[in-house]
Amino acid sequence: MPGLEHYLILSGLLFCIGLAGAVIKRSAIVILMCIEIMLTGVNIAMVAFSRFITPVELTGQIFTVFIIVVAAAEIAIGLAIILALYRNRNTIDTQKIDLLKW
Amino acid sequence: MGMQIAFWILAVLAVVSAAGVIWQKNLFRAALLLVLCFLAVAGIFVTLSADFLAAVQLIINVGAVAILIIMSIMLTREVTSGNPSGKLGLPALAATGVLAFSIIITSVSSYWPLSSSSPLEPTTAALANLLFENDGFIFLIQLGAILLLTTIIGAIVLLRKED
């Protein structure tokens, strides 16, 4: 049986991969995908703590349910904003969307 | 022993496919790799005896979110421009590498008050009791319903054609 540390290392790796992608990439859709990877990593940490430290109370799994709800809302609104942006400016490259840049 | 093998296969699959989302030049394949990463994480939830969450992960992330992302890749013709990186490539990689290293060191060297009792199985009934009892998380459930309604209205307002 793999221990708590294995799951925490896996969750940290997924979080950092998502963070790197969200900073490096230029396409707005890829940035949203990387944010989803970050949230998934956090979910693994929550469930692992719930399994290994409070196995009977399930509080970590409740947190994960709410993280999934908020992530679904975030991805729906994010993609709607990206599509509206594409309709107005014909690009979703974040380096070219610089109307508010001084 | 079987649990160990399953964990290692799923963990390597999740990390490799998440890295593939960044490295893959073809945007459509990157989206498919994201789906693979979500599938592996659903398997990880099963090894943690969180059966309800594994089903939720399959239905919401692998089902709904993946379809939304693939549809919007189609709608924005983003596939033609590939998956370009910005100017911050190396510094960002170095900073996240340091962050990953410190997370690994911290999680290995910390003391965790592990519990030896065996986990609940199945978890669905216990989760439902916690979520819908009066002294449980019922207020957050209602807040979540309002959030989802606001999301639907917001998406419609953002994408409505002006007339």
Image: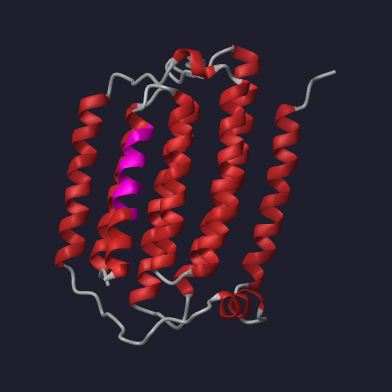
> Which residue is at 24% across, 40% downward?
B96
The answer to whether A50 is drawn above or below residue B158 in the figure is below
Q: On the rendered structure, is A56 left or right of B67? A: left
Q: Quadrant of the C terminus of chain A?
A: top left
> Which residue is at 80% across, 20% downward?
B162
The answer to whether B60 is drawn above or below residue B72 in the figure is below
Q: Quadrant of the N terminus of chain A?
A: bottom left
Label count reads 0
- Residue B114 lies in the magenta stretch: no
**Residue B114 in picture, x, y percent from top left:** 27, 80
In the rendered image, which quarter is residue B94 located in?
A: top left
Q: Nearer the viewer, residue B24 or B92?
A: B24
- Residue B11 lies in the magenta stretch: yes
The majority secondary structure of the magenta stretch comes to helix
In the rendered image, which quarter is residue B66 located in?
A: top right
Which residue is situated farthest in the bottom direction here?
B117
State which region is magenta: B10-21
**Residue B109 in picture, x, y percent from top left:** 14, 66
The answer to whether B95 is drawn above or below residue B49 in the figure is above
**Residue A52 in picture, x, y percent from top left:** 33, 75
Q: On the rendered structure, is B108 left or right of A35? A: left
> Which residue is at 57% across, 80% downward?
B126
